[in-house]
Amino acid sequence: MRKEVSRFVCSGGAWILCLISPTLALAEGTVDSGDTAWVLTASALVLMMTLPGLALFYGGLVRAKNVLNVLMQCFISAGVVGLLWILVGYSLAFSGGGPFLGDLAKVGLRSVTIESTVENFASPPRLIPEYVYVMFQAMFAVITPALILGAIAERMRFSAWTLFITLWFLFVYCPIAHMVWSAEGWIFKSGAIDFAGGLVVHMSSGFSALTAALLLGARRGYGKEPLPPHNLPLCLTGAGLLWTGWFGFNAGSALSASGLAALAFTNTNTATATAVVAWVLLEWLHRGKPTALGAATAAVAGLVAITPACGNVSPLGAIGVGIGVTLISYFALTWLKPTLGYDDSLDVFGVHALGGAWGALASGIFATTLGSGIESNWQQIAVQVKGIVFVAVFAPIVTLVLLWITRLLVGSLRVADEEEVEGLDFSQHGESAYTL
């Protein structure tokens, strides 16, 4: 059965563009069961990154009185975005439309059937069911707003958070996903490389997170008293789950069980391992002792940075990506944040915004014909910079507007002082994580 899921056809010279980022294509023929099984598995791995990976990683980093609130913020993100994706998100991101946003042709998945298919990025391309692609992309949409909560942890009202992520998903995530990953999007058409989400996921959430942190202001006692993580083993467990799930995030973006997926898998682990080793050595030299928190942060930073580049660089290039993000994020966390005094509670800006930007730039610097067929050149680097600058400007501006709207509708973004002292577990949910 022949079904058009996009007006873009992966043929001839356009095949190179198909390898730049996940996108829909004109598809016909027989579904490949191996590819389908892999992408379904990858979808589950990506969900595991949010639940429980990110929830545990963030939960271990906050104080004991706020851990349930962080877990609940992750859970409600999965619920709200998971529902909105089916109702309207998939259509806004991936159904035709113009250069900035999709149309409403697939609201409620009304034109998606069990026969409709999507071409993947194997060579030659093979087919997977469109429902599989819908759910794979849904898991990307779920984790992206959840990343933001690391910057506003321990002080944002749960009602405000729920409304904000609803608006943010519709007015920030869906437009950026369309512009970068849809065949109709202007960033995609410009030739920018974002294999698995440096621009769409990490930069959009990271720059939005900084905006939210600045608007909410610092936590009580920030800079005056210690606000240590309450459970580092929980944090490292979450980081380990993120590392594991990220193979689905990156290698799954090939939409095939193929050499391209294997390259993305290899580069993901290589960049992450490099970042961990480099960070531990740097921290050892700088502070005299390597820390478990530093190693966990390094792993996430390495994963973030290789995300846009994993299908477009060689393993040696991945090592360069890992070293680069270590220097950038370590500088941001140890000098930039204390110097400027902003309270990005769990370092979303330093890791995701700057790490994602570096990864997007490195996609052009280290690009090789091994994956995408694009070799590093100044024109490609300029294209990458254009995409980076756009997301770095668009996401925080729209986020600021959405936060103002949220405050207008719910009355206050931030919990009262006494609620913050009491802890958000009890003040927002009437529960406690630990009974002493």
Image: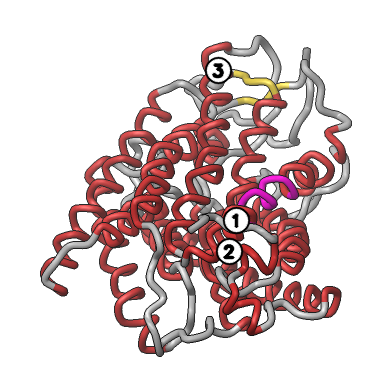
Residue 21's disc number: none
- In-front residue for pair 370/425: 425
Q: Secondary structure beneath disc 1? A: helix
For marks 1 and 3 on the same chain, the one whose residue lies earlier in the sequence: 3
Residue 146's disc number: 1
Q: Which residue is at a point 55% across and 65% down the rendered structure image?
A: 66
What amino acid type is highlighted by mark number 1? Answer: Ala
Q: Residues within 10 Å of mark 1 (few under 14, many from 20)?
A: many
When asked about the image quadrant of residue 428, the answer is bottom right
- Residue 147 percent coordinates (x, y): 55, 58
Residue 37's disc number: 3
Q: Which residues are magenta?
A: 73-80
As measured in the structure, the alpha-carbon distance from the residue carrying label 1 to the one carrying label 3 is 27 Å
* Viewer-side label of 1, 3: 1
Q: Which residue is at a point 69% across and 36% down the rendered structure image?
A: 8
- Residue 331 percent coordinates (x, y): 29, 75
Q: What secondary structure is the stretch in magenta mostly built from?
A: helix
For marks 3 and 2 on the same chain, the one whose residue lies earlier in the sequence: 3
Assess whether residue 170 is covered by the magenta stretch. Answer: no
- In-front residue for pair 156/24: 156
Q: Which residue is at a point 22% across and 50% down the rendered structure image?
A: 274
Label 2 close to label 1 by CB (< 8 Å): yes
Label 3 close to label 2 by CB (< 8 Å): no
As measured in the structure, the alpha-carbon distance from the residue carrying label 2 to the one carrying label 1 is 6 Å
Q: Secondary structure beneath disc 2? A: helix
Residue holding disc 2: 149
What amino acid type is highlighted by mark number 2? Answer: Leu
**Relative to 142, 224 lies left or right:** left
